């Protein structure tokens, strides 16, 4: 049984974690949804550079902070490698399953389409939901499409939240610099994602307020991921190593398998690559200042 002092500490720790991840996930995505509702358009160039830069910083934090912390738990390098590989495999397989079952429903995604998303609405499947909504399908079809979209977004937001939660746990329940940086980055990264959710919904006929609220709600999985990462990290050295490794692997797949390829396809230039490199260097600077 936890002592009263320990119970209060854990409760306050979780409150802080939920507040921070709510700002990063729900508020960040909601701001993007609001901007999408007001502008009803998004800029591929701006979104591409923002995503690639944020990905670079996340990559720097993962490689120079989270993975080294996982190794320092003394759970063993092989344990960390297994956790990273597991994170990559789980997110890849779940994404593949969603893509395989939904891509045929969107008319322009065919044999001539790149083998990865070339726009944000494809990456998070808001285009899939938009097709169903524009066709005024029955509530069950819309619900299923909404679940698919929410699942696709969750596959990005849960690992992002886990990186915050695991970093928080590794710092003894104190919101250290790496966790704060990750939260800020995830909030910025969620703004264009929020726009990508709300714009097709509004274009399909949904009113702006409802589209913005739905968009904000899609950020909730970030909070769930943070709780999962923190809970695993609190189990002990093995749990912390697995939490840090799994979250790192999931983020590595999201960065290299989805966001960076999509950033280059959104803005056909080498600039997203330079933006990502700049992000890595900024991440390195933040960790070691």
Image (tube, rainbow, N blue to C red):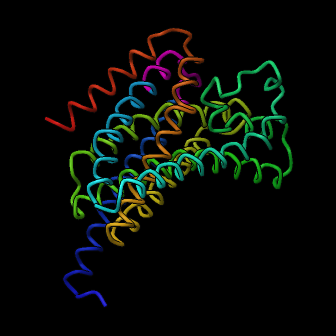
The percent position of residue 162, horizontal first and vertical second, equals 42, 54
Work out which residue is located at the far top of the displayed protein and give it.
Answer: 269
Q: Residue at x 44, y 17 (%)?
A: 273
Rendered position, 135 above or below 27: above
Most distant residue in the bottom direction: 1
Q: Quadrant of the N terminus?
A: bottom left
Q: Which residue is drawn at 50% across and 54% down?
A: 220
Residue 148 sits above or below residue 116 on the image: below
Q: Is residue 289 above or below residue 19?
A: above
Q: Residue at x 39, y 46 (%)?
A: 24
The image position of residue 185, as x and y in percent, is 36, 37
The answer to whether residue 4 shows anywhere in this view is yes
Whether the magenta-drawn stretch holds residue 47 is answered as yes
> Considering depth in this image, is 162 or 208 the residue closer to the camera?
162
Observer-nearest of 183 and 258: 258
How many dots with numbers?
0
Lateral position of residue 99 relative to residue 249, left or right: right
Residue 37 visible at all? no
Of the 4 image quadrants, the one containing the C terminus is: top left
> Residue 127's spot in the image, x, y percent?
71, 33
| Magenta stretch, overall SS | helix
Q: Up-down: is 24 above or below 268?
A: below
Percent coordinates x, y for residue 178 in the rendering: 26, 45
Left-right relation of 13 to 203: left
Whether the magenta-drawn stretch holds residue 34 is answered as no
Q: Which residue lies furthest to the left in this view?
A: 289
Please give the range of residues in magenta: 36-50
Name the residue located 57 percent from the left edge and 33 percent from the top edge.
257
| 199 relative to 39 in the view: left or right | right
């Amino acid at each position: 049984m936890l002592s009263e002092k320990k119970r209060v500490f854990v409760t306050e720790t979780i409150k802080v974690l939920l507040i921070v991840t709510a700002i990063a996930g729900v508020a960040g995505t909601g701001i993007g949804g609001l901007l999408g509702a007001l502008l009803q358009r998004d800029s591929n160039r701006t979104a591409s550079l923002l995503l690639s830069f944020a990905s670079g910083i996340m990559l720097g934090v993962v490689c120079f902070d989270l993975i080294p912390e996982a190794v320092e738990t003394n759970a063993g390098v092989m344990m960390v490698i297994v956790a990273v590989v597991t994170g990559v495999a789980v997110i890849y397989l779940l994404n593949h399953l969603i893509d395989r079952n939904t891509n045929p429903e969107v008319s322009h995604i065919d044999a001539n389409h790149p083998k990865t998303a070339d726009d944000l609405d494809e990456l998070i499947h808001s285009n899939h939901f938009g097709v169903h909504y524009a066709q005024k399908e029955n509530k069950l079809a819309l619900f299923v499409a909404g679940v698919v979209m929410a699942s696709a977004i969750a596959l990005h937001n849960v690992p992002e939240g886990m990186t915050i939660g695991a970093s928080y746990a590794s710092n003894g329940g104190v919101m250290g610099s790496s966790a704060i940086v990750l939260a800020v980055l995830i909030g910025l990264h969620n703004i264009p994602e929020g726009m990508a959710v709300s714009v097709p919904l509004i274009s399909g006929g949904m009113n702006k307020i409802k589209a913005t609220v739905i968009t904000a709600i899609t950020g909730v999985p970030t909070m769930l991921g943070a709780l999962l990462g923190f809970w695993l990290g609190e189990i002990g050295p093995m749990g912390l190593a697995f939490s840090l490794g799994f979250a790192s692997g999931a983020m590595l797949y999201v960065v290299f398998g989805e966001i960076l390829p999509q950033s280059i396809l959104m803005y056909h230039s080498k600039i997203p690559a330079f933006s990502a490199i700049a992000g890595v260097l900024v991440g390195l600077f933040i960790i070691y200042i």
